[in-house]
Each structure stands twice: as C-alpha cells, then as structure tokens.
Image (tube, rainbow, N blue to C red):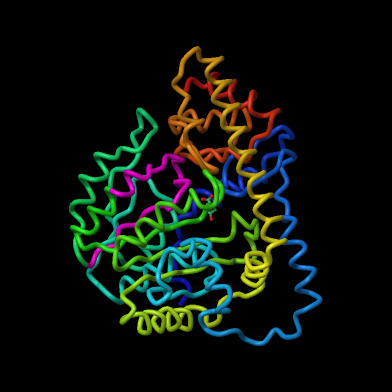
Amino acid sequence: MFSALKPQPADKILALMGQFKADPRADKIDLGVGVYKDATGHTPIMRAVKTAEKLLWEAETTKTYTGLAGDPAFNAAMADLVLGGTVDAGRISSVATPGGTGAVRQAFELARMAAPQGRVFVSDPTWPNHLSILKHLGMEAVPYRYFDADTRAVDFAGMIADLAAARAGDIVLLHGCCHNPTGANLTLPEWEEVAALLEKTGAVPMIDIAYQGFGDGLDADAAGVRLIANRLPEVLIAASCSKNFGIYRERTGALIALSDPARQEVTQGTLAYLNRQNYSFPPDHGARLVTMILTDPALRAEWEAELEEVRLGMLTLREGLATELKRLSGSDRFGFLAQHRGMFSRLGATPEQVERLKTEHGIYMVGDSRLNIAGLNATTVPILAKAVIDVGV
Ligand code: LMR
C-alpha cells in the first residue's frame, strides 16, 4: 500500500532550517524560520512563562481531559487578548487548537463545511503553509494583489480591485498584523475600506493573527481585527501564542468564530466537533500557562514588559539595518525596512541573489528574500548590509 505514496514537496521554510543546521561555517547567520532570537541567537523561555510553569507544577493535580473546546478560561482569555472586550460575548465561539496552524486548519474546514464550493482569497504572497493546507483540503485559493515589489509597500488599489470579485460563500484571508512574508501592513483607514468592501460582497473575513505584540504593540496590532469584528456579522480568527509567548513547541493557539448570537450554539458545537474529528482534545499545557499569565496581573505585567523589550529590539534592528543600507547604497531604497513591522521583511532580492547570500556569505533567508529581523544582532546588521550590497540588491 505504501508503495503508492509519492514524495511530498518539502516546506521551503523547514527545508531551509535543515540546510542552516548542516552548514559548518561558524559565522553563518540564520534569517530563515520565524522564531524570535535574542542578541546571542538564543530563543529564550519568557520570564513569565518560566514562573507560570513553576506555579503550575506546584498547583496542577490532574492531567485528565479538559473539554473538547479546551479550557473555557483559556478561550475567554484569548478572546479578550485579541478582541479587547469590544465584541458582545454572545457572538463569540472559540476553541483551543494545536498552535495557530491548528486554528487555520480548523477555520478552513469550518468554511468548507458551511460552503463546500467557497473559495479562499489569499494575499499574494502569503505564508506558504496557507496555500499548502488549502491544497491538501481540496479548497480553491484565489490570490489577491497585496505587495508592490517596487515600493515594498501594500498595493492597496490592487488588493481592493481583486477582492471585489469575492462573493457570499467565499473566505477572505487577511493577516491581522506583521504580514508574513512581506512585513507590509494595512493602515487603519485601509482596514476600514476592506471592511466596507467585505460588507458589500458578503464574503467572510478570516484573520490569521500570529504576531500580536511584535508590530506596534498588543492593542495596536489587534486594531484591524477589532474593527473587522465589529463591522462584519461573521468572522473567523486564528490566533497563535507561539511567538508572543515564545512557546513554539507547546502548540498553543485558538480559533475564534464570531456569529449572530442565534447561531452561536451551533457554531461552538461545530468547532468542538472539528476538534474531535481531527485530534480530539487540544493540547493544554501551553494554554494553561497563557491563561495564568493573562489572568494574573503580576505575571501579565511581566509578560507585557518582556514582549515590549522584544518588539523594541526588533525595531532597533530594523532601523539599524535601514540606516546602514542607506549609508552603503547612498540611496533611500531600503527605507521600507524601517517602515515594515513584525519579524519579517521581504528584501526584494532575486532568487539568485538569495542563493549568493547563502553560498558566499553564509546568510540564510527564505527564497523569496523574506528575512527574519530577529535573526540579527548589532554585530550582524553591518555584515548583512555589506553582503546585500555586495550581491547587488
Ligand atoms: C514562519 O513563517 O517562519 C513561521 O510561521 C514558522 C512556520 O511554521 O513556518
């Protein structure tokens, strides 16, 4: 039977992780996978997480199953983190999921159950796994213009023109903040326009928010989600705790669905049903840590302070890189690096230039020239800038 299996295409981001690991050069620089690293290249356990783990070890008396939807306290805390109390509780359904990817997968499945012929509009470009999961589920992905390769900013006119083709039964997938892979984000007035267009088309927005707190701050990063949540009758939100709590391997995320209160019970039941079909009970350890942190004022303050250090550190690196490239190139053409937000920016290098950065300089970034800003430090910023100019970007 297994002889019928065909090799599957390698995930480009994960393949790059393997190549970096295998490179023997001591001065290699990893700007690939979206994992936060401090100035020493280490991905630390956040202070509040470590404290919560200690408290949990003392206090936890059972590992028996939670509910199918996960711990209600986690679901409430996550809805509050993302929506900031702006949405009537009667509209909210939510479940814990294995990471943000689990939430994305469940959201697509819910959309397919509700509208089997529906299409999913995705930004061009988007996180490659969005496309891969849609293909695996047999769902049609329709790209919409998003990134202007010349200005490295959002092609908003193109985006609005393309989204006008969406209709009832379709999903429009949006990145809540810190767009992956480009780092180019919508302004609040642009979110307003997207909301107005979605109202007209009847398509349902699905917002993937995996980097809340990495861009302009916890509330500012959720402003677009909150606006959409309050304008549109039905919304899907996939939230990840991997990055902002630094608990990547714990697989902690939430899927939130907003509906008419009259449809809440069926929506909540469908989310729980989907959990049961795909993995039964969602993982709880990371979710419990997140709940403890979000609901304990001292732990929350400690977490928010460290998240802010992380965010500001990435902003400093962005500004440093833009300044150094301005000095070396004698032009403003890399100014977008300081404008972008989150972990990623798309540099605009050709695949050949990306390859040269890897082979000649030991600098690893994704083939589309997405670089992880958090992979840099004060020493490597000028090294990267020099290499970028050297390969002719
Ligand atoms: C990324 O885009 O690098 C991260 O979201 C990690 C992943 O799973 O791809």
In the image, residue 152 lies at what x, y percent? 39, 32
Classify the position of the N terminus by image quarter.
bottom left
Q: Nearer the viewer, residue 351 or 31?
A: 31
Q: Is residue 5 left or right of residue 142?
A: right
Residue in the picture at 44% in, 46% down: 179
Judge whether residue 179 is colored magenta.
yes
In the image, residue 107 lies at what x, y percent? 39, 69
Residue in the picture at 30% in, 37% down: 155
Count of numbered tags: 0
Q: Is residue 234 left or right of residue 370?
A: left
Q: Nearer the viewer, residue 210 or 12?
A: 210
Q: Nearer the viewer, residue 187 or 68?
A: 187
In the image, residue 251 lies at what x, y percent? 59, 66
Up-down relation of residue 3 to residue 305 (above or below): below
* Magenta region: 169-192
Q: Nearer the viewer, residue 224 or 134?
A: 224
Up-down relation of residue 176 to residue 109 (above or below): above
In the image, residue 274 lies at what x, y percent? 43, 79
Residue in the picture at 37% in, 54% down: 174
Judge whether residue 184 is colored magenta.
yes
Up-down relation of residue 70 to residue 203 (above or below): below
Q: Is residue 252 left or right of residue 92?
A: right
Residue in the picture at 47% in, 23% down: 393
